[in-house]
Structures are given as structure tokens and as C-alpha cells.
Image (spheres, rainbow, N blue to C red):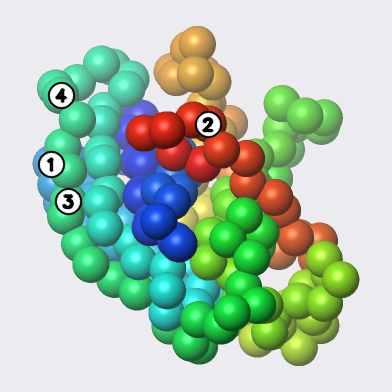
Amino acid sequence: MAIYRITPSCLVDGQICQNVVHFEHLGSSTPQALGTIFVNEWLSQIRPFQHAGAVWFDVAVRQVSPVGPAEQHVTISLAGTGGSKSAFDVPFCARVLQFRTTVAGRHGRGRLFIPGTSASAWDSGIIKPVSITAGAPLITQLKIRFIGPDAPSTLNLVLARRSDPSQTLLVNDILQRTVLGHMASRGIGRGM
């Protein structure tokens, strides 16, 4: 069993937005192949939450436990499919997916920010109920593909500590947060 860190990068209004997600992989696929699985099966479910001005351009994959070779990159160009970009879109507002495990407290939770959220999907910082309902089948597909010991993607979503990535918790639920998240800049040349 190997633990992989996957870092997708998205460009929104001139800002690079990155998330870090960890997966447990029991097979012997290459990092390039795992990056392609991530693009085809994970990003395909995320892109409908984003406006067309959000463009995914890179997926970095690295084996972190046991430590593997250098980071591999899958170069892509995929825009959001959730409508056109408008002047009212706020670049630092994002939809948030919550990851839950069987462990109570902060150590048993994770989250993923989805940059490029269309302003038509929310009102006063709250995701509209119609948008939550429309996103439910996409979240269900993520659960089917990436949660559980028999995940068809061969990648099991886990929470891993930066200090010791070999210590993981299997994610057993993915939820849509109803309140928008706010991404903070980490400085020039660094992700949000």
C-alpha cells in the first residue's frame, strides 16, 4: 500500500489555486497513470461546480509513503463547465467539500476548496439550495469512485498528516458545505 499526494492546480482570475489531497493506492500504477485517473474521475465531478473562467492546468502526483521518486506532472487544460464567468464572480470565494472519517474532532475531518464558484450559485455567502441539489449526484459519484476498500478508481481518499503521511485515516463521507469558503493568498508564486 502506498500513499500518494495529488496537487491539482487551477487558474482563476490570474491566481493559481491549489488543493492537496491524499490517496491510498493498493495497485502498482505509475504516478502518471494515477494523475490521469484523478483528472478523468475526480476533476470531471468537480468542474460542474466551476464557471468557465476556472481552468485546471496541472496535476502533480508524488508518492509520499513510502517515499517514492520525484513528483510527476500531468499537464491538462480543462475549464469549468458550470456556466459562464460573470463580472459578479468573486475570485476568493469557493465551494467547500468536507471530508469525514470515523475519528471525532478536527483530526478526523478534511476539506477541499473548489475555486471558480459562479456567483449565480450563492446568495449572501450561502450556497443556494437548488445548487446543493444539483451537486448531490456529483458528490455521490465521488463517493462511489473514491471511498471504500473496493473503490473502482483504485484510489481510496484518505486524510494524511504532513509530518507523517504514513499515518492515514480513510475518508468515509464527502459532504457539500452550505456556506462559502474564503481562500487566502499564500504569497506570490504560491497557491491559494
For residue 152, the mark is none
Q: What residue appears at the point 26 percent right and 39 percent down from the top-left corner?
A: 61
Mark 4 to mark 1: distance in Å?
12 Å
Tag 1, which secondary structure?
loop
The crowding category of the residue bearing disc 4, from other C-alpha atoms within 10 Å (few below 14, some 14 to 19, many at least 20), is few
Coordinates of residue 113 in the picture (x, y in percent): 58, 52
Q: Amino acid at mark 4?
A: Ala
For residue 186, the mark is 2
Q: Quadrant of residue 77?
A: bottom left
Q: Amino acid at mark 2?
A: Arg
Residue tagged 3: 74
Residue tagged 4: 70
Q: Earlier in the sequence, mark 4 or mark 1?
A: 1
- Circles 4 and 2, Cβ within 8 Å, touching? The answer is no
Mark 1 to mark 2: distance in Å?
30 Å
Q: Nearer the viewer, mark 4 or mark 1?
A: 4
Q: Quadrant of residue 177?
A: bottom right
For residue 30, the mark is 1
- Observer-nearest of 92 and 107: 92
Q: Amino acid at mark 3?
A: Val
Q: Amino acid at mark 1?
A: Thr
